[in-house]
Amino acid sequence: MNRIEELKRRRTFGIIAHPDAGKTTLTEKLLLFGGAIQIAGAVKSNKIKRSATSDFMEIEKQRGISVATSVMAFEYKGRQVNILDTPGHQDFAEDTYRTLTAVDSAIVVIDVAKGVETQTEKLVEVCRRRNTPIIVFINKLDREGLDGFDLLDEIETKLGLKVVPMSWPIGMGGRFKGVYNLYEKKVNLFSPHGKQSEEDTIELKDINAAELGRLVGDKLAAELREELHVLESVYPALDHQKYLNGDISPVFFGSAVNNFGVKELLDCFVDIAPGPLPRETEERMVAPEEEKFSGFVFKIHANMDPNHRDRIAFLRICSGTFFRNTNYLHVRQAKKMKFSNPTAFMAEKKSIVEEAFPGDIIGLYDSGNFKIGDTLTEGEILHYKGIPSFSPEQFRYVVNKDPMKTKQLDKGIDQLMDEGVAQVFTKADNNRKIIGTVGALQFDVLQYRLKHEYGASCDYEPVSLYKACWITWDDQPALTEFLSRRKADLAKDKDDRWVFLAQSAWTLKMAQENHPKIQFHFTSEY
Ligand code: G4P
């Protein structure tokens, strides 16, 4: 197969969900279909148990599992499907945001009983920012849940997605009989424990046929007819281009644990989901078909074992072909590097790859050369965009507990920030360092790793902040005035950009009103 054929059959996506909605279960069922695993239970959940939130070493151990399952690739109907795993724990949401920059599409899993939950809202917002095409899977139909129409409404209002139902539940919970496949006009009858057989899928071109009553009972048949009537008048048919543009989202109903509705989802996914998309760099758009290789690092995973300091940088291939043992340009460091052990992750197995194509993710062993967002090319100066830092939500001052180890502390903070563990802001008025994170857990992770990997001790002091916003300005006098008035609320991020540290929503509003020539941004990329 040539390079173009290889790249055209790649389907790289991420599954996003609020913890417990069924992401791990669905992933596993997809891998079973793809033959990447043979038995259920083979994919270890990288879900971090809630009871373990105070014990972050346990969490890191569990997170270690997620290295192995970072990318799960399998073949299905001639496609190579790459699933990028995303951490379930909300304190690691930033990792998930970054992983989403490396996908071409996403599947959102929603628990039928819970509806749209907060974590899902945030993650979908990140996808929508980049117009990532989204398919929705409503899970756990074997349980009592919200009404189908209410759910679709909720998805539209809370997630801002325009939905196109592709299947529709017949009953729910104890009364759940199956789903009606709207685009193939088939009834799929439900039997628990994933024991569906071919005979359970019955073509029913005419929804008014008496057979429907025989299959699901007259009452449910009447309900279904009525609901389908409403669906047809309210929701549009699937327009492939609109889906690819991120304008509409197909919705499926099913039960992952019972392996019900998963095949329909997968069949539709490989049919409609986009292959590797062109990507924007600061310099130009890069098409996957281009002959020359380029890619970017979207995630760095450190080894927690102090005897093995190496890290794995995860690289998304965007164009050309990546070859093992070939010199590539590390654009930020302006130096050539080659990689003798680039690794592919196939469900449980790791293997060294000789070559990789756009859409693929490979792991590069790294001794500290990479930071998130770094670009590798064959020589061209390119900087991939779309890997922003998000405004953190929790803040603390860092206090150096051992002045003899200041150098180690600074180096440690610097490197751990490159890995994306947290963000550091240096205050303009007194040079104090403030650490900002998405979740409270990162403070413990940082403290522990500084001690064990860099020999530096730090403590934290509380600081009451609402948000950190990156700023831009219309002209220099506007900035000068803002700096002189608000010096105590200003800081520099690690890339030397100005950041406004708002103490409250009100201070932010006032700053915006009083300084109309200053723009406030909630991500580092604007
Ligand atoms: P996550 O990765 O999104 O956090 O969720 P995960 O797949 O681990 O699923 C969370 C729980 O929901 C699991 O139960 C799982 O078995 C259950 N589940 C997944 N899909 C369905 C479904 O279609 N119907 C029902 N009724 N349950 C489903 P658990 O008790 O937390 O774990 P386990 O002991 O079953 O593994």
Image (spheres, helix red, strand yellow):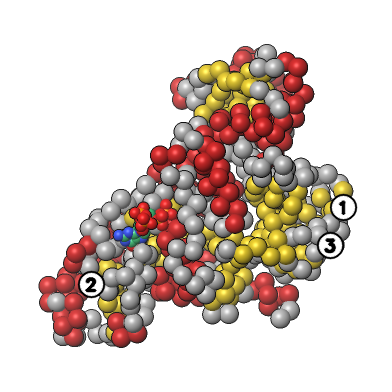
Amino acid type at circle 1 is: Lys
**Residue under circle 3?**
325
Q: Foreground: 60 or 279? A: 60
Q: Which comes before the other along the chain, label 2 or label 3?
A: 2
**Residue under circle 1?**
336
- Disc 3 secondary structure class: loop
Tell me whether the residue at label 3 lies in contact with that at label 1, contact meaning CB atoms closer than 8 angstroms: no
| Picture quadrant of residue 217 | bottom left
Q: Indicate which label's residue lies in the foreground, 2 or 3.
A: 3
- Disc 2 secondary structure class: loop
Q: Which comes before the other along the chain, label 2 or label 1?
A: 2
Q: Indicate which label's residue lies in the foreground, 3 or 1.
A: 3
Q: How dense is the environment of label 3, judged by Cα within 10 Å: few (below 14), some, or many (20 and up)?
A: some
Percent coordinates x, y for residue 104 in the rendering: 58, 61
Percent coordinates x, y for residue 223 in the rendering: 17, 70
Q: Residue at x 49, y 72 (%)?
A: 38
Quarter placement of the C terminus: top right
| Picture quadrant of residue 454 | top right
Amino acid type at circle 2 is: Lys
| Picture quadrant of residue 251 | bottom left
Q: Which comes before the other along the chain, label 3 or label 1?
A: 3
Residue 259 visible from this viewpoint: yes
**Residue under circle 2?**
177
Percent coordinates x, y for residue 4 in the rendering: 71, 75
Q: How dense is the environment of label 1, judged by Cα within 10 Å: few (below 14), some, or many (20 and up)?
A: some
- Disc 1 secondary structure class: strand
